[in-house]
């Protein structure tokens, strides 16, 4: 798809997408939790890495990662302008995610990372598989 925005406008839009997206993806996941009868989650739990959801009783942290920002290899947008800039930013997020995963693992926590695109209906099976460990002891 042609990029109709100049790079400045683009970064403005991206900034917008980022914050709004986060909220709606979290809400979508809450709907999923409810549908499957998953309980015990906390939001805004004060723990390193700021997971989107924490299940303190299950020692499980759930992150919802934006595909673009966290480098998911799916069909989500990849701007052609400023490619190096985005790539660098993304790589930083990916490295950061990895570090967070390791920190949680060291403490015996489970980390579930859900891609934004997996909240779409057609990817429901992937999502189910990912959250299955939350279902088991529910
Ligand atoms: Zn994706």
Image (tube, rainbow, N blue to C red):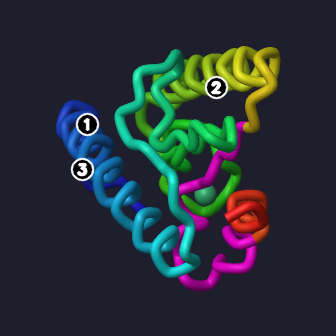
Which is the main secondary structure of the residues drawn in magenta?
Answer: helix
Q: Quadrant of the C terminus?
A: bottom right
Q: Nearer the viewer, residue 71 or 101?
A: 101
Ligand 1 falls in quadrant:
bottom right
For this view, does 88 lie left or right of residue 81? right
What residue is shown with label 1? 15
The number of numbered discs placed on residues in the rendered structure image is 3
Disc 1 crowd, CA 10 A, few/some/many (<14, 14-19, 20+): few
- Please report whichever mark, 3 or 1, sits nearer to the chain's N-terminal start: 1
Front of the two marks 2 and 1? 2
Say whether residue 114 is magenta: yes
Q: Quick check: is the Cβ at mark 1 less than 8 Å away from ligand 1?
A: no
- Please report whichever mark, 2 or 1, sits nearer to the chain's N-terminal start: 1
Real-space CA distance between mark 3 and mark 1, rounded to the nearest whole angstrom = 9 Å
Q: Where does residue 76 sit, x and y in percent of width and height? A: 53, 58
Real-space CA distance between mark 3 and mark 2, rounded to the nearest whole angstrom = 20 Å
For this view, does 39 lie left or right of residue 91? left
Query: Which quadrant of the figure has residue 81?
Result: top left
Report the disc number at residue 20.
3
Q: Nearer the viewer, residue 67 or 134?
A: 134
Front of the two marks 3 and 1? 3
Residue range corresponding to the magenta coloring: 111-128
Q: Quadrant of the N terminus?
A: bottom left
Q: Are marks 3 and 2 in contact (CB under 8 Å)?
A: no
Real-space CA distance between mark 2 and mark 1, rounded to the nearest whole angstrom = 19 Å
Say whether residue 129 is magenta: no
Q: Where does residue 18 sit, x and y in percent of width and height? A: 32, 42
Disc 2 crowd, CA 10 A, few/some/many (<14, 14-19, 20+): some
Q: Are marks 3 and 1 in contact (CB under 8 Å)?
A: no
What residue is shown with label 2? 97
**Residue at position x 65%, y 20% from top?**
100
Mark 1 lies on a secondary structure that is helix
């Amino acid at each position: 798809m042609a990029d109709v925005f100049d790079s400045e406008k683009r970064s403005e839009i991206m900034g917008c997408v980022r914050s709004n997206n986060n909220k709606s993806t979290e809400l979508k996941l809450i709907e999923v939790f409810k549908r499957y009868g998953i309980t015990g989650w906390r939001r805004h739990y004060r723990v390193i890495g700021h997971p989107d959801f924490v299940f303190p009783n299950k020692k499980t942290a759930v992150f919802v990662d934006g595909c673009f920002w966290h480098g998911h290899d799916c069909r989500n947008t990849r701007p052609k302008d400023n490619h190096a800039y985005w790539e660098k930013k993304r790589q930083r997020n990916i490295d950061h995610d990895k570090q967070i995963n390791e920190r949680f693992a060291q403490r015996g926590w489970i980390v579930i990372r859900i891609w934004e695109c997996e909240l779409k209906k057609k990817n429901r099976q992937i999502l189910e598989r990912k959250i299955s460990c939350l279902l088991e002891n529910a």
